Image: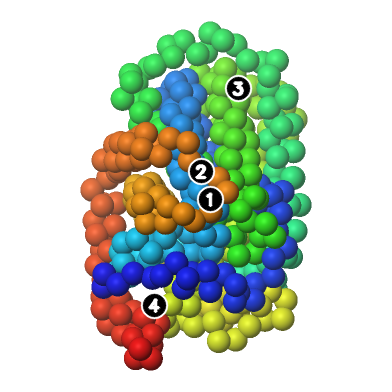
Amino acid sequence: MLRLRKYSDITLIISSSTLPRFMTSFHLIVLGVGIMIGNGTYVLPGIGASQYAGPSLMLSFVIGGLLCAMIAMVYSELATLLPVNGSIYRFAQLSLGEFAAWITGWFLILEFASAIISQVNSWSLSMTHLIQLSGFDIPRELTIPLASGGIVDVPGMAIMIIITLILIFGAKNGIRFMIIFTSANLIIILVMIIWLIPSVNPQNWDPFLPYGWRGMMNGATIAVFSIIGFDIVINASQETKNPRRDMPIGVFGSLSIVALLYIIIISVMTGCASYLALNSDMPWSIVLEHSNFPLSKILPVCGVIISCAVCAFGCLYSLSRQVLAMAEDGLFPLLPNKSSVQNRFSYRTVSAIGVILTLIIGFGNSDTFVELTLGALLCFIIAPILLLISRRQFPDKARYYKCPIPVLATIIIITISGYLLSLLSTLTWMLFGAWFIIGIFIYIFYGYRHSTFNAKSTKG
């Protein structure tokens, strides 16, 4: 359980990879931006301002952005040290041992899967709303999962099947899909911002801290939840032409764009209406209606539909790469033993992931998974520790980007992440514990027995 991978083992995985290298820094920025501006840009600013922080949500995003910037430094250095799929799971193999790596990867899977389910749930609600605005109606029982009081979420299952098929037919096609729809989403957001700017009234920012400093810090939880996604870019390492140069550009570029965009959105929203009036699933519609925007109800809904589909696809892409990385090591039964011509990775694995998620979306309680996305905070705490260990473990290995403040970054990341984790509900921690126990059982009864470490030991 404590056995370590060798550095040469990971470099062999990189050199023997059959995944086509087609991504540039532009593709990585699009991937990161597409994932980070999901339904958060349309829903979370209203919830965060009205229930948590008021206008000070702007500062909440500065704090959340600071944490994410520190993590971006850490991830960028690790990605340039070893540009390999699997995110920090691979580095945990080198520094902490196989079991710790398995648990790290297991929680990354939870992060990606929870994000997909949350985004698809929002997509389903918004699509149903758009259909109703168009004068049609869908039976309520066919838009709500069985566990939530309906029969089945048909729209949610439909979009999950569609994005799974897009990924099966090729990562290149999927990235083209992301470029087109991310551009459309940004255009919608910019149109709404430009329309609202003349209506901004600074008096609406008073009081600035209606819920106090603790409220502002609680808002930082919303900020981190919103900005999470830049770390997913790392899982595209083996499909990037020049990962050691492009990874830091992709991570920092996407993070900077999205953090700035969120701060602008919040300042405009809270400047156009009282923060209390934003307590809605569609705060954009409220502020646009106040400013007499002609498409105040339809345009924000269209934006949510586009952004949620793009975000869900990006997370599915990263989830498939995470599972494949762990399957390559024998820790998962979904071995990549058959490949599609278009993208040379196991369509069986992607299909299996798609089927499982489709069933959860159709019949499970999607609300349960919203906070579970913040399992990423656990991985954020592990990442800087891995960085410090790697500095001692591989002092002579080339690093094309170096975190300028590794110790300070580690302190800030662990402190803020630990505080944000302490704010999570008891139910979320119980679900984390259940996920952890399931992970232990899978490793003991399958992963440990089928690990490629065992094959190497036998040969030795």
Q: Is the C-beta separation of discs 1 and 2 under 8 Å?
A: yes
Calculate the distance from the C-alpha at mark 1 to the C-alpha at mark 2: 6 Å
Q: Which mark is residue 331?
A: 4
Q: Nearer the viewer, residue 243 or 368?
A: 243
Of labels 1 and 3, the one closer to you: 1
Which residue position holds label 1? Answer: 399
Estimate the spatial distance between the alpha carbons at disc 2 and disc 3, rounded to whole Å. 36 Å
- Name, please, the residue furthest toward the bottom: 459
Q: Position of residue 170 (x, y in %)?
A: 70, 71
Q: Which residue is mark 2?
A: 402
Please name the residue shown 37% across and 56% down the image. 393
Name which of mark 2 and mark 4 comes first in the sequence: 4
Which residue is tagged 3? Answer: 268
Q: Nearer the viewer, mark 4 or mark 3?
A: 4
The image quadrant of residue 19 is bottom right
Amino acid bearing label 2? Lys
* Residue 386, position as x, y percentages in the image: 37, 53
